[in-house]
Image (spheres, rainbow, N blue to C red):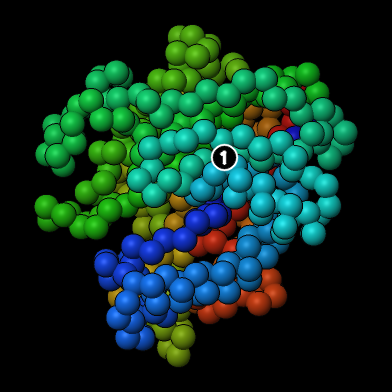
Amino acid sequence: MSVRIATFNVENLMNRFDFSGFRNELQQDRALTLFEIKEEAEYRELERARTIALTDDTRQLTALAIAATRADILCLQEVDNLAALKAFEYGYLFKMIGSGYREKYSSPGNDVRGIDVAVMMRRETADGQPIEFERLASHAHITFDDFGLYTPELEALGVGRTERIFRRDCLEIDLRIGGVPLTLYVVHFKAMSPPRNGMDGRQASMPFRIAEAAAVRRIIEERFGPGRAANKRWLICGDLNDYRERVVIEGDAYSGWRFRVAREAQSSVNVLTEGGFCENIVERRPEMDRWTLYHTRGPEERHLCQLDYLLLSPALARTNARAVPDIVRQGQPWRTIFPPGQEVERFPRTGWDRPKASDHCPVAVTLDLV
């Protein structure tokens, strides 16, 4: 008996407009900055038109990427709310795959933009085993003080000890697949912030993600009991906004691209994998082929990295020792630079920068449950 599970940051699946760019140029779309817009009413009208025009192509590509995962269960990040998810599933996914992901679960988290994590799943697996929902628990309310995770580094960033740990949530969902229990922990860690205090954005925001990772680990350990978590079926799914290595891209299209792997001295991912607590099964792929996101700030800064994770409990990892996850990259924009031999045929209407399925790639794996 098997189940196929995927994680995907769908990048701002919203059902509302954002007009903050009229007063804050940093929030304004680059297309609108080309025009002189004097009145807010005019800005709102143009922003509505721009958003709607781009959204249709974008969500067709998002749906194509999801369809390509062939997943029974989808763990999603950056979902506005269940209404947005239902509208997307019915208006886009249904047209591609028919009746499918009828069950949808989410809970309001802590993100200042209102984007949440969610789970969308079929009622049975591809081989006909029932997928039964049993329980959902949000951990968005937990503070640094609650778990004793307040540190001098957080204090230096101006964070209060009674603030909530998770920038979004750690959504815990209990399922039964053909009667076999399985628990999902769906997360979306703190994004890399702008540089500050002489540190780059990744290092400056690292204390948040370290605390989030430690909190997830504690939630799992407390759920299953000391020393027992290793023998239970669970996995952590989501966008951790951190990496242990990256593929640095040098050169250019004319002289040729060069790729090299750079390993990081510190990563919040290590907090979860340390001591064999869980396994990042994407690392079963070759190190040049683990990336789920292309990052660039121009020719001087380009790299590929893994931000999206399926972290398996030791019990699941042992049972699925030969399982290697798939990474769906056909929805990546044309600006993404692929290492040799990894090129894919893009989905129709994919643009140079946009539209695209998402800035992230879905990661999917088939797991045997015994």
- Decide which of 82, 222 is in the foreground and name it: 82
- Decide which of 60, 235 is in the foreground and name it: 60
Q: How many numbered discs, if any?
A: 1
Left or right placement of residue 54 versus residue 60 in this view: left
**Residue 264, position as x, y percentages in the image:** 33, 50
- Decide which of 34, 74 is in the foreground and name it: 34
| Quadrant assignment for the N terminus | top right
- Decide which of 259, 62 is in the foreground and name it: 62
Label 1 crowd bin: few (<14), some (14–19), many (20+), radius 10 Å: many
Left or right placement of residue 342 versus residue 212 in this view: right
What residue is shown with label 1? 118
Label 1's element?
strand
Q: Is residue 344 visible?
A: no
Q: Is residue 183 visible?
A: yes
**Residue 170, position as x, y percentages in the image:** 46, 31
Amino acid residing under circle 1: Ala
Q: Residue furthest right?
A: 128
**Residue 234, position as x, y percentages in the image:** 59, 25
Q: Residue at x 74, y 52 (%)?
A: 90
Q: Is the residue 179 above or below the residue 87 in the image?
A: above
Q: Quadrant of residue 314?
A: top right
Q: Residue at x 34, y 72 (%)?
A: 40
